[in-house]
Amino acid sequence: MVPLHSLITAIVQLSLVHTCLGKIYTRFSNLPTTKFDFVIVGSGAAGNVLANRLTENPRISVLVLEAGGSNEGVLDSEVPFFCPSLSPNTPFDWNFTTTPQIGLNNHTIAFPRGFMLGGSTSINFLAYTRGSMDDWNRFAAITGDKGWSWHRLQRYFRRNERFTRPADHHNTTGEFNPQVHSRRGINSVSLGGFPRPIDQMALQAMQALPDEFPFNVDMNSGKHLGIGWTQGTIKGGRRSSSATSYLGPKFIRRRNLHVLLHARVTRLLQDGMTRGKKSFRKVEFAQNAPGSGVDGPFGPRRTVLASKSVILSAGSVMSPNILMHSGIGDERMLSRVGIQTLHDLPSVGQNLTDHSLTRLAWNVNSTDTYETHLRNATIAAADLAEWKRSETGYLTTTRLSFLGWLRLPPNASIFNRFEDPAAGPNTAHIELLIGNGMNLPPPTGNFLTVSTGVVSPASRGSIKINSNNPFDPPLIDPGLLASEFDLFTMREAIRSVPRFLSAPAWVGYVLSPAGALAEVDFSSDEQLNTYIHNNTGTLFHPVGTNSMSRKGSSSGVVDPDLKVKGIEGLYIVDASVMPRIPAAHTQAPTYVIAERAADLIKEAWDCY
Ligand SMILES: Cc1cc2nc3c(=O)[nH]c(=O)nc-3n(C[C@H](O)[C@H](O)[C@H](O)COP(=O)(O)OP(=O)(O)OC[C@H]3O[C@@H](n4cnc5c(N)ncnc54)[C@H](O)[C@@H]3O)c2cc1C
Ligand SMILES: *[C@@H]1O[C@H](CO)[C@@H](O)[C@H](O)[C@H]1NC(C)=O
Ligand SMILES: *[C@@H]1O[C@H](CO)[C@@H](O)[C@H](O)[C@H]1NC(C)=O
Ligand SMILES: *[C@@H]1O[C@H](CO)[C@@H](O)[C@H](O)[C@H]1NC(C)=O
Ligand SMILES: *[C@@H]1O[C@H](CO)[C@@H](O)[C@H](O)[C@H]1NC(C)=O
Ligand SMILES: *[C@@H]1O[C@H](CO)[C@@H](O)[C@H](O)[C@H]1NC(C)=O
Ligand SMILES: *[C@@H]1O[C@H](CO)[C@@H](O)[C@H](O)[C@H]1NC(C)=O
Ligand SMILES: *[C@@H]1O[C@H](CO)[C@@H](O)[C@H](O)[C@H]1NC(C)=O
Ligand SMILES: *[C@@H]1O[C@H](CO)[C@@H](O)[C@H](O)[C@H]1NC(C)=O
């Protein structure tokens, strides 16, 4: 017999869930119907933009299916400074691992992806970067659709962005260019809300070395080269994710918007033929809501139907995975694992492209670094108490004070053998990520982090499957540093850091390279390669696995209007449709693609 008090507690909790979460369900049986105008698979950056924009019209019904759980009350997701705690291998991560990376001495590495409402925007490191003008103009050139150009997308950047004052309300004049920002969008963006002691030293270093390390007042103007203040998806002192913004309280209460959590989509099913083409408007999923009494990890399969279209927004790893399990992909690969091909589309899962990140740190002559705030329990408790009281203080800022976007010198020897993979002459090859300590520090020491990224890589990888069980993880090969161009770029990126740290501003502060870096002779390619092999991972920006291409092109997965080539009833809208990787952290690009996609879909279905 269940004791009365726990029954009462359960009822109170249930009703709380309803008032806090609006139309967010955890059980299939609570859905009002199984037919919606649009069914969106995945509630990440893209999925929630579409859920919001398509339900602006009260006659249009939308269901979002999300495999993960709620973001409500997840402190690590709310507090910007805690972002490194959300992955890898946590309840908020898909826990993927790569295949052995030939560019990393065959090491496998963790490949985090958000597993909760908001997707990766609920677990990411918050940096807000749009990429360069060249990046977007190349998208337009590849797809033959000028609508994807930098200029034409500006209205969508503005619909996405709500530029807000940082938590500490400091005078931000000179830290950004107000003309390139919008205060009217949905997703909040702000500068850091608490100064770090390295900030002034870094600015002075840029002033001292303007040829190689120029200050750029705003990397989001389309001209991103140089080093500038990090802008983050932060509102006041709290993370702004696609869940807190696009599904915020005033939107989620719309009667036509429904979200089902713990709903893991297994396959898209063919529901018939439309205009002589197969249509895929039926979605199959498994429910495993905690406490639903389902035996085993996954409940019985359910289906829902989209009367207009399904929109696949499960991200660069899972969107191609779901397609392949649905019989949409490369016929040879599918037949090898016993899946009947319903639509042969060889580009599905191809061209996975990602940025590599090598972790680099220097010992510093100070205790005022992240390490102290992470290790000293008294200080950590005071930081958290302040955040809980007023969402102000140390924890309101990302781990990155500055981001730098730099090019290889034009006479770099690698250009004798490789065509420049960057989108154009004003687009970076290298990123510097500058922070006042390490993300996951060792037990002792205080550090300055200047990590390096390869942001216009030549390497390509893939997403493949090796079983016909949709619950098996796909084979993820981001091909990190697989191309000699990328390894060369990483070495040159690392060599640039001591030049930056040679500025007078750092004298007496930066002491020596930390850890294994101390043993590395920076002039030796071989020694740098070993360090790189041991200390490189993903910068978390996989794209390209369902690439857009010109209408009529036989390569690529979606047309420039984001409809899947050759079939009906299916759009893909997420980071997977990017035809090349932009030299940017990919959340702003994904948001913007989804904002335009919402307009394209409204127009196609006449449902403004
Ligand atoms: C650790 C980390 C740090 C990052 N840091 C930054 C950063 O600082 N700045 C930046 O710009 N970008 C960053 N990114 C990248 C950025 O968050 C992503 O590019 C962006 O969120 C991609 O959006 P998306 O809509 O394609 O996919 P996601 O946001 O990943 O959303 C996909 C959603 O689909 C759901 N889903 C997947 N499969 C299924 C299924 N079978 N059934 C139901 N639902 C499913 C997932 O659970 C998820 O909610 C980071 C990413 C990670 C993981
Ligand atoms: C990832 O691992 C964590 C910790 O083991 C676990 O709680 C979580 O459920 C896993 N995620 C998935 C999608 O299985
Ligand atoms: C990495 O693995 C590949 C494929 O198994 C193999 O050919 C190669 O020799 C390995 N490289 C190293 C450095 O071990
Ligand atoms: C902010 O700083 C700028 C220059 O640094 C100055 O011109 C301006 O008056 C300041 N604004 C306020 C409100 O103090
Ligand atoms: C932690 O910080 C407090 C407050 O600054 C200080 O008094 C204390 O000595 C520190 N503890 C350690 C172990 O360093
Ligand atoms: C490139 O040019 C710079 C100066 O213009 C020179 O110092 C450097 O040695 C050159 N590098 C190569 C690889 O030729
Ligand atoms: C460390 O900084 C102090 C002043 O803050 C200075 O006196 C000292 O010389 C520095 N140490 C080194 C090794 O540079
Ligand atoms: C790389 O890792 C190996 C073993 O994991 C270790 O022996 C070696 O010292 C490391 N070298 C560098 C430069 O990090
Ligand atoms: C895959 O990447 C290569 C190299 O960038 C490119 O030539 C090709 O067009 C891409 N394929 C698709 C479908 O985008």
Image: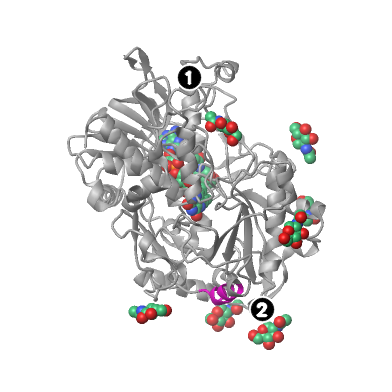
Per the image, the residue denoted by label 1 is: 327
Circle 2 packing at 10 Å, graded few (<14), some (14-19), many (20+), is: some
Residue 566 appears left or right of 459: left
Depth order, front residue of 152/398: 152
Residue 443 in picture, x, y percent from top left: 66, 67
Query: What type is the residue that disc 1 sits on?
Result: Gly
Q: Quadrant of ligand 5?
A: bottom right
Residue 590 in picture, x, y percent from top left: 43, 44
In this rendering, the count of numbered labels is: 2
Per the image, the residue denoted by label 2 is: 504
| Quadrant location, the N terminus | top left
Residue 100 occupies quadrant: top right
Q: Residue at x 52, y 56 (%)?
A: 85
The overriding secondary structure of the stretch rendered in magenta is helix
Query: Which contiguous range is marked in magenta?
Result: 196-205
Q: Secondary structure at mark 1?
A: loop
Q: Is residue 204 magenta?
A: yes
Q: Is residue 328 magenta?
A: no
